[in-house]
Image (cartoon, helix red, strand yellow):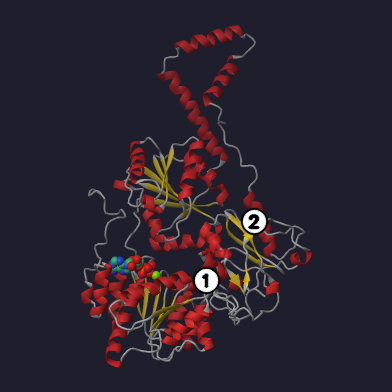
Amino acid sequence: MSSDMPVNTNDNQNPEEPTVLFSELGLDARVLAALADLGYEKPSPIQAATIPMLLEGRDVVGLAQTGTGKTAAFALPALSRMAELADTNGPARTPQILVLAPTRELALQVAEAFTSYAKYLPDFTVLPVYGGSPYGPQLNGLRRGAQVVVGTPGRVIDHINKGSLDLSNLQYVVLDEADEMLRMGFAEEVDKILEATPEEKQVALFSATMPRTIRRIASEYLRDPQEVAVKSKQSTGTNITQRYLQVMGAHKLDAMTRILESEEFDGVITFVRTKMATEDLADKLKARGFTAAAINGDIPQQQRERTVENLRSGKIDILVATDVAARGLDVERISHVINFDIPHDTESYVHRIGRTGRAGRSGDAILFMTPREKYLLRAIEKATRQPVTQMQLPSLDSVNNRRIQKFTDRIDQTISGQDLTTFREIVEKFAADHEDLDQLEIAAALALMAQGGRPLLMTEPVIPPSKKARMDRDRADRGERGPRARKTAAEGNAMYRLAIGRRNRVQPGSIVGALANEGGFNSSEIGGIEIRSDHTLVELPAELSKDQWRALSKTRIGGELISMELDSGRKPRRDDDGDRGGYRGGRGGDRGGFRGGRGGGFNDRRGGGEKRFGGRGGKDRFSDSGRSGGRRDY
Ligand code: ADP
Ligand code: MG
């Protein structure tokens, strides 16, 4: 970063960042040695604040954004305390530390972190337990005696029910990524697990945000907790105007075109989610007459630098980038940041919009958001503590008026600034030869030629497909069954067909669990689920990676391969169609707005046809049978 940056831009270190060292926090020397090996230099703010409290034995609620080191904040003091206990009592044979995490991925990450921090502690075993993997190794691991168990709530409950998870000696419980855990519908599991733990224990709750349900859980299960909220190190500059536009995926390009045509802009950087999308969008913008280029992590560094140079010098106006490729980019003329795809975390959002408003200039940040991404907008507003105001799509008329204005400006400039002698003579002769033609007609023909074949005016897109999808969805939500009330996927999504259905007694929870864990989908990516008699329709992102296909091809629910395929849109059979209906909550017990209704896994069939399942209702339920022979079964 250049040193002439004003204070309110985003890359400055927070001056209040603690200058404490890990060695001053009271951690066990063996834990400190592991940190030195890992190259951790100093504690992050959330670590500096919570580690001493946790070492003291206090219950703690720690709030800090993603990527701020919350794992170490709870793992380091836990390991220190357990190590010191083991020094006096010898190694424990049953779990002392239980960490609940929302997904298999996160559970594995936390388990790995524990393992690396416990590197110099003798006889320390960390065991991840999560749905979708066979019970055998987990049971063996538990029998051999793990001190730390990191698990997803569904599978932990299951081990408690089976009697395989002995909680009698538990000292320390952590609810990690608590907001995400509740978003995934685990509120009831979390309650049950906490109720099953011994009275005397320490509880830590870490989360990026603090929704009401978390407050409820904290007040119910934490004893006089210390609450620590670390503000985001990054704050957005007030010189940046933030707006959002609600737009369906298929209309984003049109929306971007309209915005660029109706606003004054200098340089623009637009963010998309994937490398492929950078190239794709850059090509489409070029086809629409903008000067654009893509940068992404696959493009060699030298070429990236050239592209950025081209943006700086004005050779190109629009850079289409992924988060990674644009990190730290500092180009003064960037007037607009367009979040073509919404970022998945607030930290990235702050980084992205910090690309504009450089060197004291003002900047514009525009966020495209589909209706289902609304919750991310709220998170962004909360994290930046600044409102993002809604903007309207510039109307066709305003775009066209500007196009006409620009076109006529060009005529003016040509008349006033160019030598017209040659063309004047040609046109004069042409007009003399075509006396029947009005001079205006000749001028219009020339104007058309000047436009070079591209239509000057923008026209309304042919059909707004989102509207139709929405209507279909609304109708389905109301439980109507029009003869063709077939579910239609939202923009950017597609319908997939799983070869399991009511006949296999499949539950929405096991489907969401399987998709989340095997396909790596987050809860917001899983749309409606419709369980029919012999198959299930699920709405997921239209583009899946090879890895996702591969993982899902091996996935089983209740012993059956789900054989996921794109739904061909075959007409449903009569008996299938009859079951369409609106979402019905789990039976009773819904608490804090989360889906309740836990049934002891797959074999507990809930009362009659549950059809649609809201996108955020994931749980990792699974069959408790060993039938799957070591393959992933839910
Ligand atoms: P969070 O849970 O807050 O999202 P993580 O605990 O996953 O964040 O940590 C994010 C990354 O930061 C991890 O790769 C972790 O190893 C690293 N990290 C955590 N604490 C430190 C530290 N004090 N110094 C350097 N790196 C750290
Ligand atoms: Mg974390």
| Tag shown at residue 184 | 1
Would you call the spot at circle 1 few (<14 residues within 10 Å), some (14-19), or many (20 or more)? many
Between residues 589 and 381, which one lies in front from this camera angle?
589
Residue located at (47% from left, 81% from top) = 138
Kindly tell me whether residue 210 is visible in this rendering. no
Seen in the image, is 48 located left or right of residue 317?
left
User: Which residue is depicted at the point 68% across and 55% down?
Assistant: 568
Q: Nearer the viewer, residue 441 or 549?
A: 549
Q: Is residue 330 left or right of residue 382?
A: left
| Viewer-proximal residue among 265 and 185 | 185
Q: Residue at x 21, y 68 (%)?
A: 19
Mark 2 and mark 1: Cα distance apart in space:
24 Å
Mark 2 lies within 8 Å of ligand 1 (Cβ measured)? no
The tag earlier along the polypeptide, 2 or 1, is: 1
Q: Secondary structure at mark 1?
A: loop
x then y, percent, for residue 571: 74, 58
| Residue at point 35%, 71% (across, down) | 70
Q: Position of residue 631 (x, y in %)?
A: 55, 72
Query: Which residue reaches farthest front?
Result: 629
Q: Amino acid at mark 1?
A: Met
Mark 2 falls on what kind of element? Answer: helix
Q: Position of residue 116 (x, y in %)?
A: 33, 73
Quadrant of the image occupied by residue 395: top right
Q: Is residue 332 visible?
A: yes
- What crowding class fits label 2: few (fewer than 14 Cα within 10 Å), some (14-19), or many (20 or more)? some
Which quadrant, please, contains the C terminus? Answer: bottom right
As displayed, is residue 88 above or below residue 106?
Answer: below
Residue linked to disc 2 = 470
The quarter of the image that holds ligand 1 is bottom left
Front: mark 2 or 1: 1
**Do the numbered discs 2 and 1 sit on residues whose CB atoms are within 8 Å?**
no
